[in-house]
Amino acid sequence: MDGRCTHAVLLLLCLGSCLSLTPPAQPFVRQEKASGLGSNSSKGGLSLDVPMALRVFSVDYYHVQAPFEIVLWIMLASLAKLGFHWSGRLPAVVPESCLLIMVGLLVGGVIYGVRHSAPPTLSADAFFLFLLPPIVLDAGYFLPGKLFFENLGTILWYAVLGTLWNVLGIGVCLYGVCLLASGSLGDVSLLHCLLFSSLIAAVDPVAVLSVFQEIHVNEQLHILVFGESLLNDAVTVVLYKLFESFLRLPVVTGVDVLLGGCRVLGVGLGGLGVGLFFGLVAALTSRFTSRAQVIAPLFVFLYSYLSYLTSEMLHLSGIMAIVTCAVTMKQYVEANLSERSNTSIQYFLKMWSSVSETLIFIFLGVSTIQDVHMWSWAFVCSTLLLCLLWRATGVILLTAVVNKVRRNVVTFRDQFIIAYGGLRGAICFSLVFLIDDFPKKRLFITTTIVVILFTVFVQGMTIKPLVELLEVKRRKRNLPTVSEEIHSRLLDHLLAGIEDVVGYWGQHYWKDKFEQFNQRYLCRFLIREERQARSSIVRVYQELERRDERADEEHITHVDVRCQTRPHLLEEMDSIRRILTRNLHSFNNKLEVVTKVALSNIHHMFADVNILQKQIPAYSRHTLHGTPAAEGRKPLRRHQSLGGKHSPWSQEVPDLSHYSETYPTPRNRRRPIKTTRRSRGLQGQTPQPRTFMLGRNNSLDPLEPSCPDPQKLSYALDNKT
């Protein structure tokens, strides 16, 4: 027994020596061997790394450090987001972004307490190259195109002029504060103040999306705030780079300012062109993916990200490029790809953007725990007040101008939400670390963190109660039906026709022209022939189906899993089946009656139109028609119709003689419609049309002897030419 114990102890000691960990930097020990094969002598030989002992188990953390830490951060962010949605009533009170920042503050404090050094910060390259593109791509791909382009003028008005207003106002006022407090802030120049104001005026789309998706404001207000924040970033980044280049010049002249303005315009338009090019190429590529549907969604991500990187490489606006690329390719890509591929794109984009957004807010909290803070009550408080003041005045003044040309004016309540919803986030936080070193850089970093925390926590947590208090119009929960969408498009075509008639080139006119160009050229070139919808109603139906699926999936994610219904019993299913069968039979009977009534009314309508058209003289700009009395014919008066007292066509025929010299007749003047076989027999006698109007006639039975046969009616309608 003692021998066995001794052998066991020796075996454990051997295993312990084999499992001993070696430092990863020195995995092998260099030894000199006497043999000529591996000797390292003065005559010059080869050195050979020979391990001291064979290791059964070893750890090399530095080999996997970067991907391992990335996965841990993503895991932490995902668990924090999961815990937030399972925290009961907390999501109804605190926005998700606030909780994630608090988690980041906690993690940063733990890291600082353990390591006694500053935790890792979110670098600008990591933010702009890896975390921001997925969020902007998701926002651009699922952007409500109709609302966005209808309000594009107002969005550009807020994004461009509003940003310039905020940047110049905040920068000049901060420079005045620095002059007043010259003892502590005297080394801050005007260009430094303008550089800081260009980054602090950036409304963050990540924070805006995170907050406004939870309060469910109306579609117009949401697209104004989100569109302004999306394009505002492109303008602020360009202005930041412009003022940064001004700081590196020895002297700034008027020519430099003029060239800077041209650069701002060129950067925006250049990003727009790059995004348009890659969007069309992505749509054309998706046309040839029918035999490889597995990799089809990959092209959406690759071309979008490539447009962003290309714009950044050319010093253009990457945000404008990726948004334009997503909006351009969406219609054609969805038509070319299968439903499974579209679902894959949707889920991957949502997952990718959600993870990026969560990481951004957590790193905002982690990066707050720093040793580089510098405090100045005058500068910090002045910046916070000026951001609120200049944004509010800018929104009020710009809205007062834009309301004069808008049909749907922006109300004062909406203006308050737009001004109050200007949240700052990771964009200004990333830009402030890119400032070149100068004595007050730490003050700029501290002020930026204070403004971000104030806007996200104070404004983000109070905006929902303010929306309820002001009774701001909320978004409709139900999606539009096919009939509502068709009526909406009918009104668009009607308004486009009215604008064309009066010679006004408004938004409906250009929208109609673009739709014609799109259907005639782009769709035929970018969409496969078998995937092209032959009817506009079919296109509307397909679009609403995809929208309905996305809404159902988003609704399912917010449904409490504890509220589950029990399965129906067999008796209940039989009862439901009987009720449905009885109702469908009654519905079919009513549908047949309505169809017969409609056919009868249509027949009598054509008969009355033919007789009425014979009695109205043909219109010509070369002749002056006499009055009805001069031609020996009594004019038609009210309640004296062609078909009797209750005919639907009992209206007075207008006198067109005073129009003959003013409005010329078009060349393709419509000829009189030929009479049908049915209406030829009515010549010389007064027709007796029957109208079936609910609430006016006592008899609604379409099966009376006076009602014609529906089959004969359909034959007459088919041969009406």
Image (tube, rainbow, N blue to C red):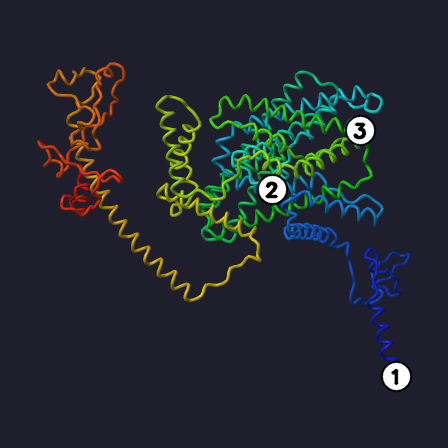
Query: What SS does tag 2 mark?
Result: helix
Residue that mark 1 sits on: 3
Residue at horizontal 19 percent and vertical 44 percent from the top: 714
Left or right for 164, reference 342: right
Q: Position of residue 451 (x, y in %)?
A: 72, 33
Q: Which kind of residue does numbered mark 3 sit on?
A: Trp
- Image quadrant in which you'd find residue 167: top right
Q: Quadrant of the N terminus?
A: bottom right
Crowding near the residue tagged with mark 2, few <14, some 14–19, many ≥20 C-alpha atoms within 10 Å: many
Q: Which kind of residue does numbered mark 2 sit on?
A: Ile
Residue that mark 3 sits on: 377
Q: Position of residue 530 (x, y in %)?
A: 38, 48
Q: Quadrant of the C terminus?
A: top left
Between residues 717 and 687, which one lies in front from this camera angle?
687
Q: Is residue 283 above or below residue 76?
A: above
Q: Which kind of residue does numbered mark 1 sit on?
A: Gly
Left or right for 462, reference 370: left
Q: Earlier in the sequence, mark 3 or mark 1?
A: 1
The answer for how far apart the CA atoms under marks 3 and 1 are is 79 Å
Visible in this render: residue 35? yes
